[in-house]
Amino acid sequence: MSERAYQSLWDSSHLILQELLDQEQPLQEPVPDRERQSFQYRLSSLYLYYLGLLRRFDTLYDQMVQPQKRRLLRRLLDSVAGRVLELKDDLVHADLCETHCLDQVLQDLKLTPADLEVPIPKYFQLEQSSVLRERGHLLGELLSRLEPVSSEESFPILHRTEAIVLLQRAERARQGRLRATFMREIRKEEERDRKIREEGRPRFSQDEAAITIQKVWKGYQQRKRTQQDRRTEMEFIGMLPSPSQEEPSGDTSPASLGEDVRRLRQTEKEEEFQLAMVKTHDALRETEGPDMKEKMKEQIRQWFIECHALTGRFPDYPDESLGGSYLIFADKTPEQVKMELEVQVQESKKKDQEKSKGKEKEKKEKKKKKMKGEETKKGEADTLLRMLPSRSIPAINAGHEEYTNLWKNRFDGLHPNQSFDSETLRAEKRKEVEEEIRIQVDELMRQELKNLQLAVDREEGRPLKPPKKKTGKKTGKKKKEKDLTPDRSVDSLFEELVVFGFLKKSETVALKDYVGDCLYLGSTLNLANKLPMPSLFDVRQNVALYGVLRLGSPDIHSMAPLIRSILLVGPSGMGKKMLVKAVCTETGANLFDLSPGNLQGKYPGKAGVQMLVHIVFKLARYLQPSVIWIGNAEKNFYKRVPKEDKEMDPKRIKKDLTKALRLLNPGDRVMLIGTTDRPQVAEMKGLCRTYERILLLPRPDYASRYVLWKHMIEAQGAQVTQSLDISALAKVSDGYTPGCLLQAIRAVLTERRLLQLSKRPLVASEFLGHLAKLDPVYREEEESLKDWYFKTPLGKKRMQLIKDQGTAEEAKLTKEKKKRK
């Protein structure tokens, strides 16, 4: 795409954004509970539209070259991502469920299931590539030092005679295998010769032999031609993919090459812009700085004189924390200063009156609460649904206004080489220079104001008052964590965690590799009073929203609702560890392993555990983004510790872990992710307090199994043909997890079988024998996980909502029956 095409895409995106901002205003008002469905529908439509905008802004920011436009696009991209996360949180509060049935909304908005996909901004990995490279080198060096120790432990030293005996056994076995194969070939040749002697070799004439060969060859050619014609017909009607889609070429496509070229141009233009910013700042400071300084001084002196003439005294200079003299230039006039002084006097009088009235107000509020409680019991009042206050909408509005004021009507004619706009740059830098000079002027004018006040007080004979000392007021801030390692460097802590195995190198796994199809009949199941379970697609979307988007950018993390921890619950083989690795890969996060099995024998005692948790969270904050993974998370909250786990003492980290989680602030891109397949053995309260979001991973449905079979077979290097009935495999494999399917596919598709695919295509029956040897997820196991999930706080609310809706429908039916009678 050309720059003009990207500009038109940007323009159309802002038209959609303006419509969305207009739709946001009615939703800010509270809605009664009886309109829950319409409220959910409007939230869902907004959520889908913002997802589309996020996809557009990601493309624009990744491929736009002009540096000033890219800065605005980055702010818009982060703020739209923050709005998506806020709407997801509102949907959870409205729907009382982590997964949402949006199939009906998709159909009404004429969108496809691909529009449900949460786009992960490409700059997450591009901007952290250098940091990841350095961290990988450091981890590689540390692990290489540990390799000799681990190799000595894993391979014991043998005695010389034992080693000789072992080699002799291996050599005799090798010779025996060769002798057996040789004898087998001899027997086959003897058997072949015997049959020829008994039956007699048939003799053909030269013409008959030629005719036989021609028949075979012509038949082969005709069958091949028929198959090719049928394939072209199926490709034409869209029933089979084209060869270009099936076989990915090894060479990079021209589109990908163009994208890489544009990224190189982005870095060049960014370097030019950085140099221009420094030069423009220095030039403005030298040329316009002195004039700005004198004008500010004159304005502030004039303000002193006017305030003294109006009020008879000099005003207090605004504190720097409140903006300093910026308030003087922006808002305050002498009349306003006089009004402020009068208000201060009146407020001191009102304080005493308010104290006496406070007790009466408390009594009235208690009475109102009692009245409200009685009304809700009687059914006269409804609970209200409302959207949570947004932090990202002001940023979206600011970015939209900047676009309309600066870039809406500007095209390539102003900057054909995609270089920066010098006028816009000078305007931005002029504001920065003014702010720097204002701070310097404030220091000078504060001293000048003190001198004026002293001079006037001496002339009028007023006693000099010593300056009041500011008393530190108690605030509601959280206590800071005590640093238990103040004298140690970050490098030493990093090395210690690597040596003990708590900081690990994560495997590169893309989130898109967690394959699954969405739930197409969710709304239909809701209408039939059946509770739809999340699909693998829904699980992947929730992990992208809760984990990837929040950890990928500090700006998105600050705007999004704070989530510190996630718990992935599902049977073994569902890909829980794969999702943890995918979060680390997509965001470039560090992986800390605090699983109970990894803690055994390390950092003993209460002080040791406290020190370990402190070091992990301290390093996680310093090297953010970071993921702290706890496998078998139920062991930390055992109801009763079994005998085999008593030596491990899995509950010893419980208290320190919860304390450390509470100390995580909105600026800390650190997330705790737990995985478990037996949550029933854990204490419910402690587990739900520690993990704020609980995601259930049920066994895959038919659509997800169909996509999984096809994707996994192709990933192993085989091509899916018409001879392989994937639909039958998806039906037969009901109850099996993706891990079981992968084991069966790897057992079938060996190197030898892959070489035979051209002569003998794959058949569904080949996988059944290997699949039958594996254990599926039985109904009882899945039902126990569902029952446990519906005992969680969110699950209880969901079940109560379903009961309330059912009773409301029954009441309507009874009223209709009475009317008919």
Image (cartoon, helix red, strand yellow):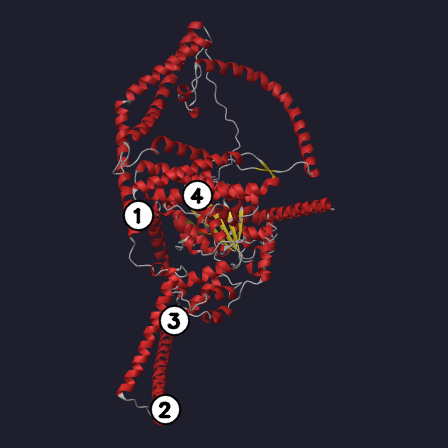
- Mark 1 vs mark 4, CA separation in Å: 46 Å
- Does residue 503 appear in this view? no
Q: Position of residue 577 (x, y in %)?
A: 46, 56
What is the secondary structure assignment of the residue under circle 2? Answer: helix
- Residue 753 got which mark? 3
Residues at marks 1 and 2 touching, judged by CB atoms closer than 8 Å: no
Residue tagged by mark 4? 485
- Secondary element at tag 3: helix
Q: Residue at x 35, y 46 (%)?
A: 128
- The residue at which mark 2 appears reads as 195
The Cα–Cα distance between marks 4 and 2, rounded to whole angstroms, is 86 Å
Mark pair 3, 1: CA separation: 38 Å
- Real-space Cα separation, disc 4 to disc 3, in angstroms: 57 Å
Q: Looking at the picture, which amino acid does disc 4 mark?
A: Thr
* Earlier-in-chain disc, 4 versus 2: 2
Q: Dot 1 corresponds to which residue?
A: 259
Q: Neighbour class for label 3 at 10 Å: few (<14), some, many (≥20)?
A: some
Q: Nearer the viewer, residue 632 or 480?
A: 632
CB under 8 Å between discs 1 and 4: no
x%, y% of residue 37?
A: 58, 43
Q: Amino acid at mark 1?
A: Glu
Characterize the local packing of mark 4: few (<14), some (14-19) or many (20 or more) Cα atoms within 10 angstroms. Answer: few
Q: Earlier in the sequence, mark 4 or mark 3?
A: 4
Q: Amino acid at mark 3?
A: Arg
Say whether disc 1 or disc 2 marks the residue closer to the N-terminus.
2
Q: Residue at x 43, y 25 (%)?
A: 321
Q: Quadrant of the N terminus?
A: top left
Nearer-N-terminus badge (3/1): 1
